[in-house]
Image (cartoon, rainbow, N blue to C red):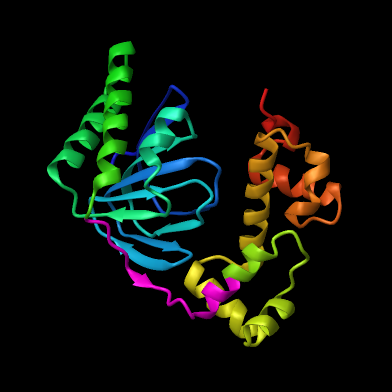
């Protein structure tokens, strides 16, 4: 049996996590950026535009507010780096506007990732170790922007009903949306739309819309918008239902995320 470990540090508002764990399913639309390096494990990856079985040693860059789903049925080992916008990071990520899957990795990317992992594997980290991790992270971002070996799995065609459905949701996120309404607009039956969406995206339409709306709400709140005034533009008819959904997704009330 593999030894289970989970090494984590936070430095300069960046979270680094080196993990060996068991079966998991993770889906998120979040307000921070993420880099994941899958070292080992049998992982399936879903996005709004493609599906892919990840190979060992695959690097994934996920910009904020991009829907993604990971499914794994066996033990896995991965490095995860989560970070919010800053002037320095935004300039390095300016060319990465969509989810990027990179593999096989060249030696420069591998050496930077191994440097981060080697430091995270230490029993204890001092200031120099953390500074080394941060420096390797900035260099990693720089290398990622010029990486040319990005690849995607099975693409969802532009005229696919899912693409049409996602565009309709994005264009009408502030309105009441029903499965019957969306299926009529796209030209398929409600049962077909529901089945194909879950199959291709890995999540129900209802859950997808909810996560999109709440991620939008959090972004607006972090821009100093009043939570009691933005729920309508996020598609909620009353504040109480918005408050409950927000609390359930983020684990804290909307007022917690107002920038000080």
Q: Position of residue 223 (x, y in %)?
A: 66, 35
The quadrant in which residue 142 appears is top left
Q: Is residue 69 left or right of residue 228?
A: left
Rendered-image quadrant of the C terminus: top right
Residue lying at 56% horizontally and 75% vertically, measured from the top left: 164
Query: Quick check: 221 above or below 64?
Result: above
Residues drawn in magenta = 149-165
Q: Is residue 8 left or right of residue 205?
A: left
Tell me, yes or no, whether the highlighted magenta stretch contains residue 161: yes
Report the number of discs: 0
Q: Position of residue 148 (x, y in %)?
A: 22, 53
Residue lying at 76% horizontally and 57% vertically, measured from the top left: 235
Residue lying at 66% horizontally and 39% vertically, measured from the top left: 251
Q: Is residue 1 visible?
A: no
Tell me, yes or no, whether the highlighted magenta stretch contains residue 235: no
Q: Position of residue 255 (x, y in %)?
A: 75, 32
Residue that protrudes farthest toward the top in the picture: 127
Q: Is residue 248 visible?
A: yes
Along the line of sight, the residue nearer the viewer: 184 or 96: 96
Residue lying at 48% horizontally and 65% vertically, measured from the top left: 48
Q: Position of residue 8 (x, y in %)?
A: 40, 29
The quadrant in which residue 80 appears is top left
């Amino acid at each position: 049996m593999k030894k289970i470990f989970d090494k984590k540090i936070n430095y300069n508002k960046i979270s680094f996590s080196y993990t060996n764990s068991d079966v998991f399913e993770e889906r998120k639309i979040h307000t921070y950026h993420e880099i994941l390096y899958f070292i080992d494990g049998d992982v399936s990856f879903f996005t709004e535009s493609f599906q892919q079985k990840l190979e060992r040693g695959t690097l994934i860059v996920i910009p904020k507010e991009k829907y993604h789903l990971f499914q794994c049925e066996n033990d896995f080992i991965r490095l995860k780096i989560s970070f919010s916008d800053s002037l320095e990071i935004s300039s390095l990520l300016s060319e990465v506007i969509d989810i990027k899957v990179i593999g096989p990795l060249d030696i420069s990317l591998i050496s930077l990732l191994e440097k981060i992992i080697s430091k995270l594997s230490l029993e204890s980290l001092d200031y120099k170790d953390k500074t080394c991790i941060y420096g390797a992270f900035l260099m990693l971002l720089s290398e990622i922007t010029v990486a040319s070996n990005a690849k995607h799995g099975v693409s969802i065609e532009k005229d696919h009903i899912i693409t049409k459905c996602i565009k309709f949701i994005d264009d009408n996120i502030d309105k009441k949306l029903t499965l019957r309404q969306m299926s009529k607009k796209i030209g398929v039956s409600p049962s077909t739309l529901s089945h194909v969406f879950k199959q291709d995206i890995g999540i129900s339409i209802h859950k997808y819309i909810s996560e999109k709306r709440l991620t939008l709400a959090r972004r607006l709140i972090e821009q100093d918008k009043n939570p009691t005034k933005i729920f309508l533009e996020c598609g909620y008819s009353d504040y109480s239902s918005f408050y409950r959904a927000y609390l359930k997704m983020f684990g804290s009330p909307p007022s917690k995320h107002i920038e000080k």
